Amino acid sequence: MIKQYPKLIELPRKGKAIIVTDIHGNQKDYYRYMELWEEFQSKDNHFILTGDFIHNTKTPDGSLEIIESVKKHYEDEENFHALLGNHEWAQLTGTSIFKAGYNQNYDFLNLVELKYGYLSDDKLHSYFDLFRKLAIAVRTENQVLISHAGPAKTLKALMKSVT
């Protein structure tokens, strides 16, 4: 089956969801949520990561380990959904984000370089490929809208796309 990458993910009425926001490279929190998902996972339930799973201002920064895990779950599980957050978008577009006086884009690139060395360009491209595939919102059949941040210009059209 070919997986399509819509900008809006539509979920059925049946089932429950774990909705996780703003992990920001915090491996401890991320893996606690993943433990919950392992217990909660079924064909009717959904895991929704609403973006900003990268960029941690504290050490250790687990952004790369989290991306690897997100990528695997996203590709292997139909009910695992990741949305594009402003931090992933900023990294993808080269728009700098500063927090606590640190350029998080630069720190992220350094993290990739330190971990992967001569393979860092390939890894970075694979991360950017993932970011480009991520949707911007999830809508449930009973019209609950879940997104990371402010509405995109296309949000009205997305909301009207299925009634």
Image (spheres, rainbow, N blue to C red):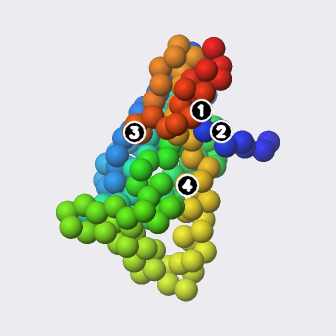
C-alpha distance separating marks 3 and 1: 16 Å
Residue drawn at x 57%, y 77% is 121
Callout 3–callout 4 Cβ contact below 8 Å: no
Residue drawn at x 72%, y 42% is 4
The residue labelled by disc 1 is 9
The residue labelled by disc 4 is 131
Labelled disc at residue 151: none
Q: Is residue 28 left or right of residue 77?
A: left
Count of number-bearing discs? 4
Residue drawn at x 44%, y 58% is 90
The residue labelled by disc 2 is 6
Q: Amino acid at mark 1?
A: Ile
Callout 3–callout 1 Cβ contact below 8 Å: no
The residue labelled by disc 3 is 149
* Near-viewer residue (46 or 8): 8
C-alpha distance separating marks 2 and 1: 7 Å
| Residue 71 pos. (x, y %) | 56, 54
* Of the image marks 3 and 4, the number of the one nearer the N terminus: 4
